[in-house]
Image (cartoon, helix red, strand yellow):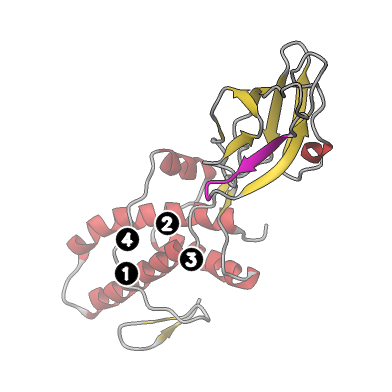
Amino acid sequence: MAANHSSIYKKYLQARHAFEEYTLKFLDRLGSDSKSRKKISLYNTIASWLDFIGEEVPDPIFKDGRSPNRVVMQIIPTLPSEDTEPKAVNIFIEDSLGVREKIGYTGYSTEGTTTAVVSGQINAHPDISSTYNSSDAAITLTFSKGSRYNGGRIIVSNAITYPSAIYISGGADSVTTSLNLTSEELSRIDVLLDKIAIELDLIYSDQKYLELYNIGLEREVTQSLKTANNLSLTAEDGAPLEV
């Protein structure tokens, strides 16, 4: 199976946890001989790579957007006097910055209230659609997903609305974590994580990942990081470290 964002992050989370446990025992096993110095160099290398992976491969988030809450309203036009013509009852949506857009209109019935007619402009709007309930003369506006109209309001000219203040809220944009890594780079990181697992005596599993993820393991490995665009690091002696 080809390495991807999700599979890499699952391995990374387990490797980071195992490395933190490894760190607690690391100092007790050190001495002053050359073998210990090699262990220190390896330790620093693993720490640097895990720090790099943590920065470049964050928790994969795929969160769908949410539509604003529906707006249900009744429109009662201002009745014209005998010697005046009825004024247009226009429906506007005003965003949080005060910018208005006409989205429809209603007309008069013989009884002086609004008809069931709502302008086709609403139904043709890319983000808003409407329905009318003749039993209670209620117009319902529904919105597409996103936060664009949050904090905005519905305004109707030459009429009284119920409720009198009609605000829009509850919308949310979709969230997707993206990577700036190529498929080749992800494959190299995948191989690297497998090598780190050998050093840490770790076996990756979905069960272990879920256990760590569910308890909210978010501690960071505090190690310095220096890397080039070709995914290479430099050891303490200046030698390049390649995957």
Q: Which residue is mark 4?
A: 221
Q: Which residue is mark 3?
A: 56
Residue 64 is at least partly visible in this image: no
Q: Which residue is mark 1?
A: 43
- Residue under the point 63% across and 47% down: 100
Q: Are dots 3 and 2 in contact, CB under 8 Å? A: no
Indicate which disc, 4 or 3, sits on the residue closer to the N terminus.
3
Q: Which residue is mark 2?
A: 15
Indicate which disc, 2 or 1, sits on the residue closer to the N terminus.
2
Q: Which class describes the residues within 10 Å of circle 4: few (<14), some (14-19), or many (20+)?
A: some
Distance CA(mark 3)–CA(mark 2): 15 Å
Q: Are dots 4 and 1 in contact, CB under 8 Å? A: no
- The region drawn magenta spans 89-97
Residue type (three-letter) at the residue carrying disc 3: Glu
As drawn, the label of residue 216 is: none
- SS class, disc 2: helix
Q: Are dots 4 and 3 in contact, CB under 8 Å? A: no
Residue 73, compared with residue 202, is above or below; it is above
Q: Which class describes the residues within 10 Å of circle 1: few (<14), some (14-19), or many (20+)?
A: some
Residue type (three-letter) at the residue carrying disc 4: Val
Q: Name the foreground residue: 104 vs 194.
A: 104
From the top left corner, tell me how far across and down residue 241 is, in percent: 43, 81
Q: Nearer the viewer, mark 4 or mark 3?
A: 3
- SS class, disc 1: helix
